[in-house]
Image (cartoon, helix red, strand yellow):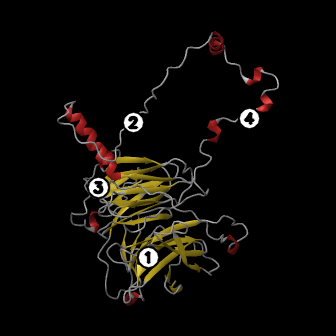
Amino acid sequence: MPASNPETHPYDLPKLRVSFTPEDDTRFLSQEDNVPEYFAVQFCPYQPVDADPVFAAVSKKHVLLCRLTANDDTQPYTIIKVIRDDDADSRNYTCTWSQDKETGKPYLCLSGEDAKIKIYDVTEGTLVNDINDMVTSPINPLVIATASDDTTIRIWSLDPDHKDMPCRCILGGEGHQWSLLTLAFHDSGRYMLSAGHDQIVNLWTLPDLPTGTIQQPLEVHYPHFSTNEVHSGVVDCVAFFGDWILSRACHDDIIALWRIEGFSSKDPPPPPESAPTTINPEMLTRSAFTKDSPDQHASHSQYTRLLTFFTPGSGNMFFMRFKLHHMPGHHPVLAFCNANSKIFFWDLARITSYHDWTRGLMRANGDRALMPERPAWLTPIVHRARPEGKQKPELTVRERKAADAPPKGIELIPGMAELYSKETLQSWDGTAAGPSCRVDRRQGRWAPA
């Protein structure tokens, strides 16, 4: 989608082009598993800007590699390759893209229930090398991070020089108490978010990773920020929006936008010894970015909740992911798919623009000379005018009597009730949520501009 000027040409929200259902792969699993599901989709970030975007869709046993086209509306996609995982114990849940250090070939890293990381050369469709979430460092495509059921985050190097000890760092210790589900790198590559089944959201400061030979990975025992107060359910998706944080949890039916007080990526990274420990288990929020307080109820000053985005229809399902589109020249747009085949979009620039405009109206206090210009995307509601013509004639005596008579329900007229359906319009509301398919949507991703 072409870049737009946020001031004059607001970002056009996406429209559905096509829906397609890939092959049902449950026959390769046990007889008890009869639900075909795709858990992750990721666009390849290592393509030329003008190239047709390529994405990978991950199911339990297959990876679909597809290319989108901009011209052919009847068939706007092409399935390039289907990679099947022949490992009998594999159930794939997540993927991330990387690159070959020497050739620049795109690699797809795949993982899931068997806790193995499998790296595929997508050009050849072959396995290069043999987990709940994986992300790639924004500053080094050879560095990936994994989150797993053992409550640790592991930082891996795909550099061939590190093949003897690819795990370079472990974030664990007292950070989490239960299985992890989601990770996110900060754009600086220095900080990382983690969350999972224990409802805790942690912010970790990553050390400088060793570049030479090591005997064992570095270990980080405590995050510099930790809280379980933002959400009341399993936290299955987190992301950075600048230095602010987006997160969601099942049962909450919302995505929260919040900030850690005192945290700025422009400041020098805090030293490891400043990370708060768990010596006081009654503290629900611990932060190295604000002064400690003996009051266990003072956690409201350690983070601030800024906005909530309502996501109805998610219910008790977890492992559902949102994605933020945030690129130069575009409005930042948040996307989320719920369990009722509905996709939500929030243009964050419009939210702040509308706030500034309404504040300007308040300051103008009715003075037209001081009133700010209405945003171009905020189209006023134009009420439809009544068509001109002859006025409606007066009712006859018979018509007035009929209008004044009390209504007769169909139950008062014998034999009429069987002739008509008693279904109401309300009972049909929402039965056609999706335009062409009815699925439980778990994840949405943005194609590179």
Residue that badge 3 annotates: 6
Residue that badge 1 annotates: 97
Which of the two labelled residues, at mark 1 and mark 3, occupies the earlier sequence position?
A: 3
The residue sitting at 40% across, 47% down in the picture is 308
Estimate the spatial distance between the alpha carbons at disc 4 and disc 2, rounded to whole Å.
37 Å
Three-letter code, disc 4: Ser
Estimate the spatial distance between the alpha carbons at disc 1 and disc 3, rounded to whole Å.
30 Å
Residue that badge 4 annotates: 421
The residue sitting at 51% across, 66% down in the picture is 73
Q: Position of residue 25 (x, y in %)?
A: 65, 72
User: Are discs 4 and 1 less than 8 Å apart at CB?
Assistant: no
Q: Position of residue 287 (x, y in %)?
A: 31, 56
| Quarter of the figure with the C terminus | bottom left
Q: Nearer the viewer, mark 3 or mark 2?
A: 2
Three-letter code, disc 2: Val
Estimate the spatial distance between the alpha carbons at disc 2 and disc 1, rounded to whole Å.
48 Å
